[in-house]
Image (cartoon, rainbow, N blue to C red):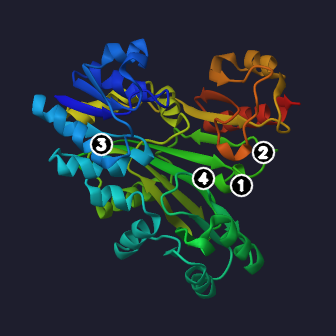
Amino acid sequence: MHVLFIEPTFPRNQREFVRALKQAGAFVTGIGETPAHALPPDVRRWLDGYEQVRSVVDEGALLDTVRRIQRRGWVDRLEAVIEAHVLPAAHVREAAKIPGTTSRTAWLCRDKPSMKEALRAAGIPCAQSTGASSADEARAFAERVGFPLVLKPKAAAGASGTHKANNREEFEAVIRRTGLDRGAEVAVEEFIEGHEGFYDTICRDGEVVHDFVSHYFPNVLEAMRTRWISPQIVCTNRTAATGYGELRELGRKVHKALGIWSTATHMEWFFGDKGLKFSEIGCRPPGVGVWDLYAAANDIDIFREWAKVVIGDSTADTLSRRYSAGMIALRPDRDGVIAGCDDLDRMRHKYAQYWIDEHVPSPGTPTQPVENGYMANAWIRLRHPDYDELRGILNEIGETVRLRAR
């Protein structure tokens, strides 16, 4: 099977998808922005061909490249796993008559107001929301729904560019900050109180092959705005517990309503006083190294499991559910450059048997803003057979390890 894979080198874990496709038996051609001579040696080894394109989101250039490859031989699949690449890939896929995620599905998984309109029509509980291209449209929604509200780019990933407004004064400030009063387009949503997590899957022919449940501590918006918090993402191995059946059923309905077929998905949800509510979904794997947590928790090569779906292999490894696995992000105490990290060695020694890996910038490295995300500065990943024990260890690390800056 001949698979075209978009952007095989950046970010770094992209090469794992290429490796997995090759090991699963695919003939793999990469399409990326990096010059061929600059490809890492391992990527060159796994690729059977490579085409450079000026931009992988330039649909015209991407289509020209795909058609040039098709003139040389048959192409079975065109795959993209980065949020910004999914919709251009879907448009090109349809123009080149290659099977895979449709442009309708890709659009509904990218444009948040359209996504929620489709899901509400299917009876799926969502926050009230609208798309706004003017300040007056947003104000009208605020009058109807009330505060608090959340404003975010219509095609944002995670909490990028997301703002919460608790009252009219904050709302007007966010309108100016987002550029809504100057023609920008945003999604405006009812703010839902409750615990936030995500439900991720690998699907084949519309059916879930593998699924995973993770939790945020605290919720993403707070985590990405508050320096002193060391936020956590924790994948649970208690997926048979009461309540997760309702989450699985919600995921199944979302997949059906959006036409999700053979792909990885990343779906966020809230649970609170109003019950279980859908938040948003991406037609691609989760970011910030979460797939590494799933692999470590379940004794699988998750990239190979994805590759099997792509090439049509009907076999699937069994998830062991032996471990819960989690990641904790460590923030520097100020902006500047990294000066050191206190008590890391002691924690690593104490919990060595549960330690997966870590990243701590060396002294002198410039800090990154807190809002850049979970992997912006330092992070540690661990696994443990007991979910509660893992949470306790992560809390201890968050309360003990200090990343200093000057």
Front position among marks 3 and 4: 3
Horizontal side of residue 259 vs 190, given as left or right: left
| Label of residue 229 in the image | 2
Q: Position of residue 248 (x, y in %)?
A: 41, 54
Among numbered discs 2 and 4, the one appearing first in the sequence: 4
Among numbered discs 2 and 1, the one appearing first in the sequence: 1
Q: Residue at x 37, y 28 (%)?
A: 17
Q: Amino acid at mark 3?
A: Ala
Q: Is residue 53 above or below residue 219?
A: above
Front position among marks 3 and 2: 3
Circles 3, 1 touching at the beta carbon (< 8 Å): no
Task: Say which element carries label 4.
Answer: loop
Q: Residue at x 17, y 44 (%)?
A: 98
Q: Residue at x 38, y 33 (%)?
A: 7
Quadrant position of the C terminus in the picture: top right
Query: Residues under labels 3 and 1: Cα distance?
Result: 39 Å
Quickly name the residue at label 1.
222
Task: Say which element carries label 2.
Answer: loop
Circles 3, 4 touching at the beta carbon (< 8 Å): no
- Label 4: how many residues lie within 10 Å, few (<14), some (14-19) or many (20+)? some
- Label 3: how many residues lie within 10 Å, few (<14), some (14-19) or many (20+)? some
**Residue 331 sits in quarter:** top right
Q: Is residue 182 above or below residue 51?
A: below
